[in-house]
Protein backbone atom coordinates (compact mmCIF):
# COMPACT_ATOMS: atom_id res chain seq x y z
CA UNK A 1 0.00 0.00 0.00
CA UNK A 2 1.27 3.46 -0.85
CA UNK A 3 1.29 6.13 1.83
CA UNK A 4 0.29 9.73 1.07
CA UNK A 5 3.15 12.10 0.45
CA UNK A 6 3.79 15.30 2.35
CA UNK A 7 1.83 17.41 -0.15
CA UNK A 8 -1.27 15.19 0.15
CA UNK A 9 -0.76 13.38 -3.15
CA UNK A 10 -0.93 9.61 -3.36
CA UNK A 11 -0.82 6.93 -6.03
CA UNK A 12 -3.77 5.05 -7.53
CA UNK A 13 -3.59 2.16 -10.00
CA UNK A 14 -5.25 2.49 -13.40
CA UNK A 15 -5.61 -0.29 -15.97
CA UNK A 16 -6.13 1.07 -19.49
CA UNK A 17 -7.58 -1.85 -21.43
CA UNK A 18 -7.00 -0.74 -25.06
CA UNK A 19 -3.25 -1.17 -24.48
CA UNK A 20 -3.44 -3.50 -21.44
CA UNK A 21 -1.20 -1.17 -19.47
CA UNK A 22 -1.18 -0.74 -15.70
CA UNK A 23 -0.29 2.78 -14.66
CA UNK A 24 0.41 4.47 -11.37
CA UNK A 25 -1.15 7.94 -11.38
CA UNK A 26 -0.41 10.43 -8.59
CA UNK A 27 -3.53 12.26 -7.45
CA UNK A 28 -4.97 14.11 -4.48
CA UNK A 29 -8.45 14.07 -2.97
CA UNK A 30 -9.62 16.94 -5.21
CA UNK A 31 -8.75 15.11 -8.44
CA UNK A 32 -11.87 14.40 -10.47
CA UNK A 33 -12.61 11.16 -12.28
CA UNK A 34 -12.49 13.08 -15.57
CA UNK A 35 -8.95 14.31 -14.81
CA UNK A 36 -7.85 10.82 -13.78
CA UNK A 37 -9.23 9.39 -17.04
CA UNK A 38 -7.55 12.11 -19.11
CA UNK A 39 -4.17 11.56 -17.44
CA UNK A 40 -4.38 7.77 -17.76
CA UNK A 41 -5.38 7.83 -21.43
CA UNK A 42 -2.65 10.30 -22.39
CA UNK A 43 0.00 8.32 -20.51
CA UNK A 44 -1.07 4.91 -21.85
CA UNK A 45 -1.89 5.85 -25.45
CA UNK A 46 1.01 8.33 -25.78
CA UNK A 47 -1.28 10.84 -27.52
CA UNK A 48 -3.06 14.00 -26.44
CA UNK A 49 -5.79 13.91 -29.12
CA UNK A 50 -7.79 11.08 -27.52
CA UNK A 51 -11.58 11.51 -27.48
CA UNK A 52 -12.21 10.94 -23.78
CA UNK A 53 -15.97 10.61 -24.32
CA UNK A 54 -15.34 7.23 -25.96
CA UNK A 55 -14.07 5.77 -22.66
CA UNK A 56 -15.57 5.01 -19.26
CA UNK A 57 -13.98 4.59 -15.84
CA UNK A 58 -14.85 1.71 -13.55
CA UNK A 59 -14.25 1.64 -9.80
CA UNK A 60 -15.05 -1.40 -7.68
CA UNK A 61 -16.70 -3.07 -10.69
CA UNK A 62 -19.16 -0.29 -11.51
CA UNK A 63 -18.98 2.46 -14.11
CA UNK A 64 -18.54 5.93 -12.65
CA UNK A 65 -21.28 7.84 -14.47
CA UNK A 66 -20.61 11.26 -12.91
CA UNK A 67 -17.02 12.06 -13.84
CA UNK A 68 -17.15 15.38 -11.99
CA UNK A 69 -16.95 13.44 -8.71
CA UNK A 70 -13.70 13.77 -6.81
CA UNK A 71 -11.75 10.77 -5.59
CA UNK A 72 -12.64 11.79 -2.05
CA UNK A 73 -16.38 11.78 -2.83
CA UNK A 74 -15.98 8.38 -4.45
CA UNK A 75 -14.17 7.01 -1.41
CA UNK A 76 -10.98 6.15 -3.30
CA UNK A 77 -7.79 6.26 -1.27
CA UNK A 78 -4.16 5.33 -1.82
CA UNK A 79 -3.57 2.38 -4.16
CA UNK A 80 -7.25 2.31 -5.27
CA UNK A 81 -7.77 0.35 -8.51
CA UNK A 82 -9.49 1.90 -11.53
CA UNK A 83 -10.13 0.60 -15.05
CA UNK A 84 -10.42 2.79 -18.15
CA UNK A 85 -12.07 1.00 -21.05
CA UNK A 86 -13.92 1.82 -24.28
CA UNK A 87 -17.55 2.80 -23.71
CA UNK A 88 -18.69 0.63 -26.61
CA UNK A 89 -17.89 -3.04 -26.89
CA UNK A 90 -15.15 -3.87 -29.33
CA UNK A 91 -15.87 -6.41 -32.11
CA UNK A 92 -14.05 -9.72 -31.88
CA UNK A 93 -12.31 -10.83 -35.05
Image: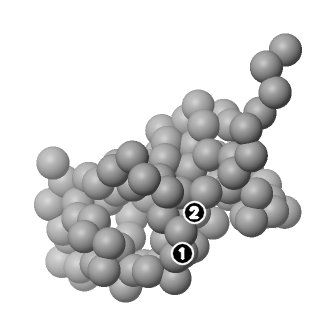
Marks 1/2 in contact by CB < 8 Å: the verdict is yes
* Residue 21 shows up from this direction: yes
- Residue at left offset 73%, top offset 64%: 52
- Residue at left offset 69%, top offset 51%: 87
70 horizontally vs 65: left or right: left
User: Can you name the residue that lies furthest to the top here?
Assistant: 93
Q: Where 73 falls versus 37 (above or below)?
A: below
* Residue 9 shows up from this direction: no
Instruction: Count neighbours of disc 1 (C-alpha within 10 A) and say few if under 14, some if 14 to 19, many if 20 or more.
Output: some
Q: Where 89 falls versus 62 (above or below)?
A: above
The residue at which mark 1 appears reads as 67
Instruction: Count neighbours of disc 2 (C-alpha within 10 A) and say few if under 14, some if 14 to 19, many if 20 or more.
Output: many
12 horizontally vs 62: left or right: left
Find residue 20 and report its horizontal and vertical position in percent.
59, 31
Find residue 89 and report its horizontal and vertical position in percent.
73, 38
Q: Indicate the quadrant where residue 28 lies.
A: bottom left
Q: Nearer the viewer, residue 41 or 9?
A: 41
The residue at which mark 2 appears reads as 37
Amino acid sequence: MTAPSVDGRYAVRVMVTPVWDNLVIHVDERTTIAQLKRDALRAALKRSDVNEQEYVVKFRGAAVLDESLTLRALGAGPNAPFIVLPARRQPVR
